[in-house]
Amino acid sequence: IARLKAERALSELRERLDSQDAALATSERERDELREKLEDLQFSMAESMIGEEDNKLGGEGAAGASAASSGPAGDGLAMKPEAASASELSSLLERVSSLETRLAEREAENSKIREDAELEKQAAADEAASKLAAAEAAAAEQLAKLRSESDEAKHQMEKRLEEAGRAADEAKQRITELTSQLESVQASSTSLAAENERLSSDLMQAEASAAAARSETAAAVAQVDELRSQCSDLQASLQQARARISELLDAAASAPPPPPPPPPEQHQLQQQLEFLNSVIVDLKAKNTKLERDLYLLTALPDSSDTPSGGVQHQSYSAQPPRLYCDICEEFDQHDTEDCPVQGGSSESPRPSTRRLADASGGAGSNGGASRPYCHICEIFGHNTVDCNQDETY
C-alpha cells in the first residue's frame, strides 16, 4: 500500500513537471515568436532605412534636376517622404521597444517559472525520494514480514504434510489390519456356515430321534399301563390267596387240629404262593425298569428347546428301593444280606409267617436304612444320580 501511494505521488509530480515543462515550452515558443517578430521588424527597419537612404540619394539627384528646372517647388516634394519614413521608423522603434519589454518580461517570467519549476521539481524529487525511501522501508518491512509469515506457513505446511504422512501410514496400517480382520471374519463365516449346516443336520437327526423317543415313550406308557393292569390283577389274586390263607389259619386256630391235608395239596398251595411271589417280584422289576425308561424318555428336552439338537440329561432322584429278602420273600422288613435266617437254621419259614406286600409298593419300613440302588446298572452299591456309566439313547 505504501509503495502504491509513493508511485501515485511520483505520478502526480511527473504530471506537474510535465505541465510546467509544457508552460515553459509555450513561453519559449512565444519568446521565439517575439524574437522572430523583432528580427522581422529590425529587418524591415533596415530595409526601410535602406529604402530611405536610397530615396534620399534618388531624391537628391531628382532635386538637383528639378531644382534646375523648377526651383523651390521641388524641395517641398522631397520633404514629404522623409517625414513619412521618420514617423514610420518611430512607430517601428516603439513597437520594437514594446516587444523587447514584453520579451524581457516574458524571459523574466520564463526564468521565474523555470526556477519555480526547478524548485518544485527538486522539492517533488526530494519528497518523492523520501516517500520512496519510506515506501521502500515499508516494503522491506512488509517483505520481511511476508517472508517470516511465508517461512512460518512453510513450516506449518511441512508439519501438516508430516502429520498427513503419518496419518496416511496409520490409515494404511489400519486398512491392512481391517483387511486381515475381514479375511479372518470371512474364514470364520465360512466355518460358521459349515458348522450351521452340520448343526442343522444334527438338529434334523435330533428331531427324528425325539420323534422316535416320543413314539417309544408312548409305547412304553402303553406297556406300563398294561403291566399295571396285570399287576392289579395279580394283586387281586394275591389278596384272594392271602384271604384264603388267613381264613384257613383262623379256622385252623379255632378248630381242633384237623388231620393234615394230603401232601400234594399243601405242596400245590406252596407252589402257587411261590409262583405268585415270583411273578409279583418279576412284574415289579419290569415295572420299575419301564418307569425308569419312561422317566428318562419324558425327561428328554424338546428339539425346539435345544438349538444344537443335543440331549440334555436331567438329574433326578429316584425313590430308594424297597427292602426285600430273597430268603424270607418279604418286603420292608430287612434285606437279604441282613436276613437273620442266614447262618441259622436251614428250615425255611412257614408261609403263614410271611408278610406279602402288594406289588404296587407301599410305605417303607422305618426300621433299617435303605441300600443305594442304581436303576441304570440295576445293581446295588450306588445311586442312579452317582452312576458314571455313559447313557446312550
Image (cartoon, grey):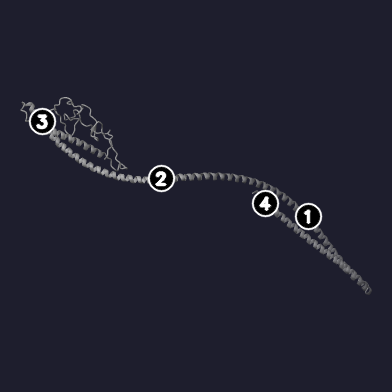
Mark 1 / mark 4, whichever is N-terminal: 4
Mark 2 / mark 4, whichever is N-terminal: 4
Numbered circle sitting on residue 111: 1
The answer to the question of whether label 4 and label 3 lie on touching residues, with beta carbons closer than 8 A, is no
Describe residue 44's horizontal placement relative to residue 364 as left or right: right
The residue wearing badge 2 is 185
User: For the residue labelled by badge 3, is the local secondary structure a helix, a strand or a loop?
Assistant: helix
Task: Give residue 40's position: percent from left, percent from top.
Answer: 81, 64
Q: Measure the C-alpha gap from mark 4 to mark 3.
A: 150 Å
Q: Nearer the viewer, residue 48 or 290?
A: 290
Mark 4 / mark 3, whichever is N-terminal: 4
* Marks 1, 4: nearer the viewer: 4
Task: Give residue 355's position: percent from left, percent from top.
Answer: 15, 29
> In the rendered structure, which amino acid carries the disc numbered 3?
Ile
Numbered circle sitting on residue 7: 4
Label count reads 4
- Is 10 located above or below residue 77 in the figure? above
Q: Nearer the viewer, residue 285 or 4?
A: 285
> Is residue 89 at least partly visible in the picture?
yes
The answer to the question of whether label 3 and label 2 lie on touching residues, with beta carbons closer than 8 A, is no
Q: Measure the C-alpha gap from mark 2 to mark 1.
A: 102 Å
> In the rendered structure, which amino acid carries the disc numbered 4?
Glu
Mark 3 / mark 2, whichever is N-terminal: 2
Mark 2 / mark 1, whichever is N-terminal: 1
